[in-house]
Image (tube, rainbow, N blue to C red):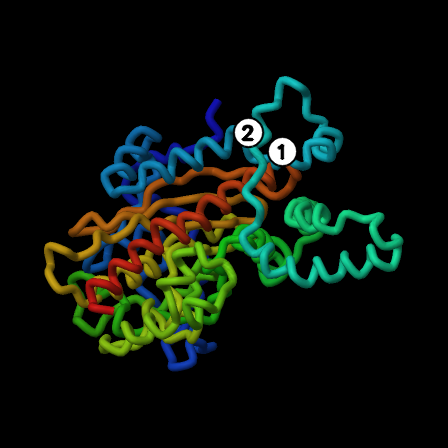
């Protein structure tokens, strides 16, 4: 049976969930405020009240979702996610360790990747210092001529690669242990964010150059991009609704700022280029917020975390407002010709609720936005499922570094930057 699990709600429009308290804050130059305000958007159903409504499609079938993704140029993304949830999510390099720890049988060989992971991109930055360290150690331990230092240097990238996988395994073990501890003895959301959700997201981007995770709990939506409500005065908009994390592209200081000269992100997405692009905009932020990290770093994946499933409707409402304002912001990017305007991308959205993770996809349908899903991802309560989740997050991080990056690059080129 496919690991993709879709909600079987009775409606295709936003469904109703139990009402819960609303967290909201006003936009500010610093991106944070403790002021609370009353918003007309408190539940998922309320997203339909926006001037450009947001519909949440819980009933979409897998073939329908695949077709919609294909129409928006992201069909391969869903296929890769479906595949990694079924097979190939365990690192083959650690088979001797994981076979015993996870009690994997011979007929479950499909759970392992068919080939070793590519060596981590940033190993080169460690090579010089590591070579010096090993050379010094060999010279002190062995008489001259008894050690083959050149062969040691050749094997060093492999050693570092295996070490990175072992460190990843150790991190996953700690996350699983913390998840079970927090399930038994209730902890605050801030603890879950710091010890579980944030750590999983950081693992996902650890070895993806140019992609990082930002905690944006304190980021507010600038009033210029708050989506207006329909049939209300122009000044009536939902209050700024916060989410918790975003995957972002991190511009480099210069094309030579990193040692990996083969990485396109290093060459083309520089800080000076981003700031030159922002200099031509009325609002000096790539995203819809004045929160400092979001000004220079294009964000492409939004994450909302909760520890109470009763807050699901509020979480979806917050995600809906955030993506609506993001689309509003990027729709104002300059372009030389309307016909050449880069097509707006499909936006992956992650929702973490206690031990459960869900993946949604947002689409700009012209007269409305649509959030489709959800895809249920195994939780961090067991090591094997934590690897599944990490596999999905790896795919999303690499989507940021490829498809989303290409979209950002086209936006900058259209502005003549």
Q: Which of 243 and 386 is in front in this view?
A: 386
- Residue 168 in view, yes or no: no
Q: Nearer the viewer, residue 311 or 347?
A: 347
At a point 39% along the width and 56% down the height, the residue shown is 264
Q: Position of residue 320 (x, y in %)?
A: 33, 55
Badge 2 or badge 1: first in the primary sequence: 1
Q: In which quarter of the image is residue 74?
A: top left
Q: Where is residue 392 in the image (x, y as percent from the top left)?
A: 49, 42
Q: As drawn, is 2 to the left or to the right of 150?
A: left
Question: Do tag 2 and tag 1 residues touch (Cβ < 8 Å)?
Answer: yes
Q: How far apart are marks 2 and 1 (CA)?
A: 7 Å
Q: Mark 2 points at which residue?
A: 114
Q: Quadrant of residue 136?
A: bottom right
Q: Is residue 278 above or below residue 119?
A: below
Q: Position of residue 259 (x, y in %)?
A: 52, 62
At a point 36% along the width and 71% down the height, the residue shown is 289
Q: Residues within 10 Å of mark 1 (few under 14, many from 20)?
A: some
Q: As drawn, is 91 to the left or to the right of 80?
A: right
Q: Name the residue under label 1.
A: 92
Helix, strand or loop at label 1? It is: helix
At a point 75% along the width and 30% down the height, the residue shown is 100
Q: Which of 41 and 320 is in front in this view?
A: 320
Q: In this view, does 212 lie above or below 178?
A: below
């Amino acid at each position: 049976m496919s690991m993709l699990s879709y909600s079987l709600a009775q409606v295709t429009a936003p469904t109703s969930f139990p009402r819960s308290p609303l967290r909201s804050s006003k936009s500010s130059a610093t991106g944070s405020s403790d002021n609370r305000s009353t918003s007309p958007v408190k539940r998922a159903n309320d997203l339909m009240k926006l001037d450009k409504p947001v519909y949440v499609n819980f009933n979409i079938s897998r073939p329908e979702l695949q077709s919609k993704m294909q129409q928006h140029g992201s069909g391969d993304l869903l296929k890769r996610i479906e595949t990694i949830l079924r097979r190939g999510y365990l690192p083959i390099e650690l088979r001797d360790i994981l076979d015993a720890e996870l009690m994997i049988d011979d007929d479950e060989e499909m759970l392992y990747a068919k080939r070793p992971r590519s060596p981590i991109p940033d190993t080169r930055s460690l090579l010089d210092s590591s070579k010096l360290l090993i050379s010094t150690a060999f010279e002190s331990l062995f008489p001259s001529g008894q050690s083959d230092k050149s062969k040691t240097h050749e094997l060093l990238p492999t050693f570092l690669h295996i070490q990175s996988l072992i460190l990843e395994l150790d991190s996953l073990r700690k996350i699983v242990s913390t998840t079970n501890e927090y399930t038994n003895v209730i902890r605050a959301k801030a603890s879950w964010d710091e010890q579980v959700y944030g750590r999983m997201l950081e693992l996902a981007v650890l070895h993806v150059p140019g992609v990082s995770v930002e905690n944006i709990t304190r980021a507010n939506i600038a009033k210029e991009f708050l989506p207006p409500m329909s049939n209300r005065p122009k000044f009536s908009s939902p209050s700024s609704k916060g989410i918790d994390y975003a995957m972002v592209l991190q511009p480099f200081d210069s094309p030579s700022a990193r040692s990996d000269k083969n990485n396109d992100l290093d060459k083309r997405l520089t800080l000076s280029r981003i700031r030159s692009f922002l200099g031509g905009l009325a609002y000096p932020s790539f995203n819809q917020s004045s929160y400092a990290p979001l000004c220079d770093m294009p964000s492409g994946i939004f994450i909302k975390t909760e520890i109470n499933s009763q807050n699901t409707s509020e979480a979806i409402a917050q995600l809906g407002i955030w993506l609506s304002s993001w689309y509003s912001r990027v729709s104002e990017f300059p372009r030389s010709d309307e016909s050449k305007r880069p097509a707006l991308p499909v936006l992956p959205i992650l929702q973490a609720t206690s031990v459960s993770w869900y993946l949604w996809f947002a689409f700009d349908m012209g007269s409305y936005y649509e959030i489709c899903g959800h895809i249920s991802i195994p939780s961090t309560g067991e090591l094997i499922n934590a690897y599944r989740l990490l596999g999905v997050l790896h795919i999303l991080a690499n989507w940021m570094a490829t498809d989303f990056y290409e979209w950002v690059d086209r936006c900058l080129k259209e502005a003549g930057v």
